[in-house]
Image: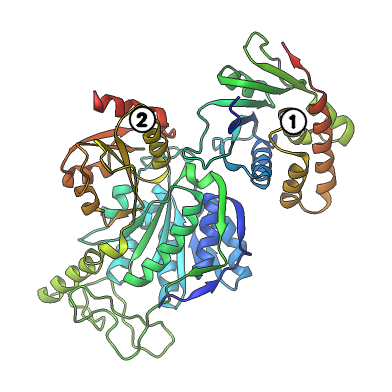
Amino acid sequence: MNDTKKEIRIAGLGGQGVVFAAQLLGRAGVLEGWFVSQSSFYGPESRGTLCYADVILSRESIDFPFVTRLDILIALSQEGYDRFAKDTVGCTFFDTGRVKPDLSLKMEHFSVTAEEMAQKELGKKMAANLISIAACCAKTGIISKEFLIKALQELIEGSQRPVNIKALELGWELGIKAVAHV
Amino acid sequence: MSPKIKNLLPPGNYFFEGNQACAEAALAAGCRFFAGYPISPSSEILERLSWRLPEVGGVFIQMEDEIASIAAVIGAVWAGAKAMTATSGPGLSLMLENIGYAIITETPCVVVDVQRAGPSTGQATRPYDGDIMQVKWGSSGDYQIIALAPWSVQEMYDLTIQAFNLAELYRVPVFVMGDAALAHLRESCRIPEEVEIVGRKKASGVAHFGTDELSGVPPMASFGEGEGLIITGSTHDALGYRRTQDSDIQQKLVNRLNEKILSNVGEIIETEEYFLEGADVAVVAYGIVARAALAAVKEARLRGIKIGLLRLKTLWPFPEEKIRALEAKKIVVPELNRGQLVREVERVAQAEVISVNRVDGEIMRPGEIVEAIKGVRD
């Protein structure tokens, strides 16, 4: 993977918090000192259909702000995995409850029990998005936990904040322990 | 003339979508009235202003359609406000009649056109450079408008402020030509402590619709200030009286509406140049496509091709002199359409012009432009 530039795609279904997760990752990237661009793609009929959002982190200013070389895929749904896994050159993080990966693809696959943990520990399947991005950051080292939490505090106020911070912490633990499937 | 005013947001680096940056820029520029009708991919501008305008003492109205939206904007301007609307191609089509009215009444206003794939309803969430000609030629008669093409979230902010300033300086509708990709792209956006804004030039007891100079911009007045104002879309004299049978006044008015812009192109037009010195090939690009073009130019230069980029921040008035001054033997013009602005480039260029197009509603990639560049050189 290129150390001065990371191109990350979060792919799932509309309603899974794909765009929010990318926005959080992007804001955390800015706090961490990266140049960042974040874009999202969805149709007018977005809920329940394929939705993906990209984050580019770069040490230099970004000329073209959209993905041209996908380093990291975070797959929250089978549709998202099937569509983009073959274009991914670095590694994939996938939600074990949602995605059956094709391990014949030449890249590292990291399984994250995101939705399962979200339900079990937080009573909210919806937090799987934050668990997944935190796991990715912990494993790859692209963004520190401190800035993920700081970005979250900027984006979420009030009573929903603690449970979302918990989701990031859970994901971080899963990410540290994650082992590549080969 | 250009006082610096304190920004409404605390200065700093924000992580904004293009549409959010545009809405905040309008507020910073002094916009206190927005009327609009929601349409993808521009709706976030309307949504943000629906709660931000009341916070700063402004007025937000969601109208019944785009025709009423631009009409309300024109009315608000004559009541003394700085005003804006935002739409996309199909909405712009509805606004065109009243945009003509804004032009002949010399009503300073800002129209943000977040372009999407067309014609008609087309594809609501897909980027396109579909309205480059519509903004210039869509209304009736002979006229000039100003259109700016931001290429980043930062420029959605900076050029929206500039649009308000130019609107006041020349009493003309100014268009900010965004697109679906830029509207929803998030990037760092620096909000400065102060912004330079142009206030409305007003005077009482004088002509508000004509000047002695052939290319002058008359001062305005607002309703409620005691001035006798007649505002009409018909040909009018310097005091605003209808003169629908007078050929001298028709000629003088039409020439002034055009010349007040054309005689000031040096002040209005902004472009950026990258690596153009000694370049055999020049890429001329604008908007989000210019981002791909810059990446492509850098890559082609690594392969030993002498190539540079001329980026147009101003689309209208068209930067003719900048194109004419290009020394390259070939000019490549990438656009998200079947070739709109390229016609203007061809009209004035001294070199062979190659149009590169994408019309499937996807973003143009640097690789496509690199391929086109290689083809041109061979």
| In-front residue for pair B298/B370 | B298
User: Under tag 2, what secondary structure?
Assistant: helix
| Rendered location of residue B87, percent (x, y) | 45, 53
| In-front residue for pair B109/B289 | B289
Q: Is the residue A7 above or below the residue B254 in the image? A: above
- All told, the count of numbered labels is 2
Type of colouring? rainbow
Q: Which mark is residue B300?
A: 2
Q: Determine contact: label 2, label 1, CB under 8 Å.
A: no
Q: Quadrant of residue B24?
A: bottom right
Is A102 positioned to the left or the right of B113 in the image?
A: right
Give the class, few, some or many, for how many residues have Cα within 10 Å of label 1's Cα (few <14, many ≥20): many
> Is any part of residue A51 visible from this angle?
no
| Rendered location of residue B313, percent (x, y) | 36, 52
**Residue at image point 58% right, 39% down:** A59
Mark 1 chain: A
Q: Which mark is residue A132?
A: 1
* Three-letter amino acid code at the position of disc 2: Ala
Q: Is the residue B167 above or below the residue A5 in the image? A: below
* Three-letter amino acid code at the position of disc 1: Ser
